[in-house]
Amino acid sequence: MCGIVGYVGSKQALDVIVNGLRRLEYRGYDSAGVAIISDGALVVRKKAGKLANLETLIGSDPMPDSTTGIGHTRWATHGGPTDRNAHPHVSEDGRVAVIHNGIIENFAGLRAELTAAGVVLASETDTEVVAHLLAHSLPEADGDLAEAMRRTCRRLEGAFTLVCIDRTQPDLVVAARRNSPLVVGLGEGENFVASDVAAFVDHTRSALELGQDQVVAIRPDSVVVTDFAGEPVETRPFHVDWDTSAAEKGGYDLYMLKEIAEQPRAVADSLRGRISKDHRIQLDASEAEDAALRAVTKVVVIACGTAAHAGMVAKYAIEHWTRLPVEVELASEFRYRDPIVGPDTLVIAISQSGETMDTLMALRHAKAQGAKTLAICNTVGSTIPRESDAVLYTYAGPEISVASTKAFLTQIIAAYLVGLYLAQVRGSMFEDEIRGILEELDSMPSKVDLVLDTTEPVRALARELASSTSVLFLGRHVGFPVALEGALKLKELAYMHAEGFAAGELKHGPIALIEEGVPVIVIVPSPRGRSVLHDKIVSNIQEVRARGARVIAIAEEGDEVIAEFADHVIRIPAVPTLMQPLVATVPLQVFACEMATARGLDVDQPRNLAKSVTVE
Ligand code: AGP
């Protein structure tokens, strides 16, 4: 999963590219590099580490003026994060430079073929084979770089966004995509290619999304798109409706803090326009789609990481509202377990980025089995919604920090809307029941706001516990996936062992982990909803405290019982059971963020991680 930028126009290509890469650095930061064309020569600079390392290199070894170039920030897949493996990669004859996002699955055979032909490979990467194949294809293509790209792509298997330049054609950038994102920025006398619109939105908000197995050739005054066979393809430009300020930190020290604070608006925006004045769900579904939903006998959610936790929360609600069985499957496991999926299955793919390869491949498997597919996604025009039968976008706005926060809450909102819509079209709930829940959802932005106003005790606790070696999280019912999500946040941000448990599972083994002073964070169910759950979790708290645990209870206002059993109580607004994940998760996000900050770690770009994992 990498950041990619290509530019051709009248500006200094290096400036445009480096600024674009800076906006994409969240996509990968193992190394960075640029290539420009100057006086018929390729000029390349590349360096392991973050973009700043590349800028330092260029500062000490300046590059000439140029108006054509490509740039790359890398998340390593094949070959370690070294200078040698950094992109761009150049063909042996020095004519072509190429950058790549994805994985060339048949690269080993191609490397062997090139080696046998006497090519000396300079890196360990899969990408380098593309540079050599392009150079070898140019003569057969009569020097047509786009045709050379098409010929090369027809030999490749796997997932790739490729962008290349040819030193003999200084006003041309050619790109191709299969299973990996690529957007084209349409400017005046200039054009761009990038893995994300954030790279060029400073220059133009007119863009088009390249489709599967397509090649684009951009010049300052032309954009030509074909398929891999060379046939022209109709394109659909779109307007980018957020500017870079939305993707900037907006005054916060961290993208994560900004995105945690944006959650009330994100929830409100994701509800907006989907509830009619007479409190019915309106999702722009056709009558045929409604009929298909009435025929559904099972729902399967496929997702990864935080998105999977959102699916687990939604399971409780959708089963309760529709009486349909809901299976939540880790996407990376789904297609390898020979799942039972057919035309009467609704498969819901939840993904913030819309590019997670595990989820995309699971989606394709489900489609091949005839399932109806619906994407819940935060990235307009990304691959997963484009390959689904329908999509319900979350409107959380760009989520830059690697740790997912506002996407999680809005994924729950969207999944709830799907569940209520299913109940509405299938008649499994009375209209007034649906109306009541919609009114609860309507109140959630303000409830989340209340939590955000009372986070100081959580921050103080995080700083106090910063030297802990392990933290456990307990929850019941919808609190269980919240416990998993709290543990994931702590793992990925503070690099600390953390584990979430169904509280009832503790006595079946994990309680052996409890010893003096171990912090245990407990998501306490409302005493008003299912009081039996509240009573059970109080027992669980007593079990761990008896063994020396330090108990931090996330409990609703007015729950006075819990105060006598917990060492600390973090208060959240009293909300109905199914709404609690939307408020209980926020303190856990803040806790993990503060813990990582106290530990001096890189909160927005944690080690080993990337914002969107576009490799399996
Ligand atoms: C969450 O904090 C992680 N960044 C990760 O688990 C993420 O949720 C997962 O990779 C799925 O990403 P997606 O929503 O873009 O598909």
Image (cartoon, helix red, strand yellow):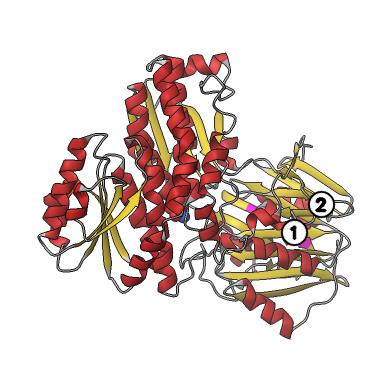
Residue 491 included in the magenta stretch of the image: no
The residue positioned 13% from the left and 48% from the top of the image is 539
Q: Upstream in the sequence, badge 1 or badge 2?
A: 1
Q: Amino acid at mark 1?
A: Gly
Number of marks in the rendered image:
2
Q: Amino acid at mark 2?
A: Ile
Looking at the image, do the residues carrying marks 1 and 2 touch, with CB atoms under 8 Å apart? Answer: yes
Examine the rendering and report whether any part of residue 18 can be seen.
yes
The residue positioned 45% from the left and 18% from the top of the image is 424
Q: Position of residue 227 (x, y in %)?
A: 72, 40
Q: Which of these two is toward me, 365 or 185? A: 185
Q: Quadrant of residue 16?
A: bottom right
Badge 1, how many Cα within 10 Å: few under 14, some, many 20+? Answer: many
Badge 2, how many Cα within 10 Å: few under 14, some, many 20+? Answer: many
Q: Of all residues shown, which one is farthest toward the bottom? A: 60
The residue positioned 77% from the left and 34% from the top of the image is 234
Q: Position of residue 255 (x, y in %)?
A: 55, 60
Q: Of all residues shown, which one is farthest toward the left? A: 546
Q: Which residue is mark 2?
A: 218
Judged from the image, the secondary structure of the residue bearing numbered disc 2 is strand
| Horizontal side, residue 536 vs residue 588: left or right | left
Q: Quadrant of residue 433?
A: top left
Q: Position of residue 431 (x, y in %)?
A: 43, 16
Q: Quadrant of residue 71?
A: bottom right
The residues colored magenta run 161-165
Q: Which of these two is toward me, 140 or 310? A: 310
Which secondary structure class fits the magenta region best? strand
Which disc is residue 6 wearing?
A: 1
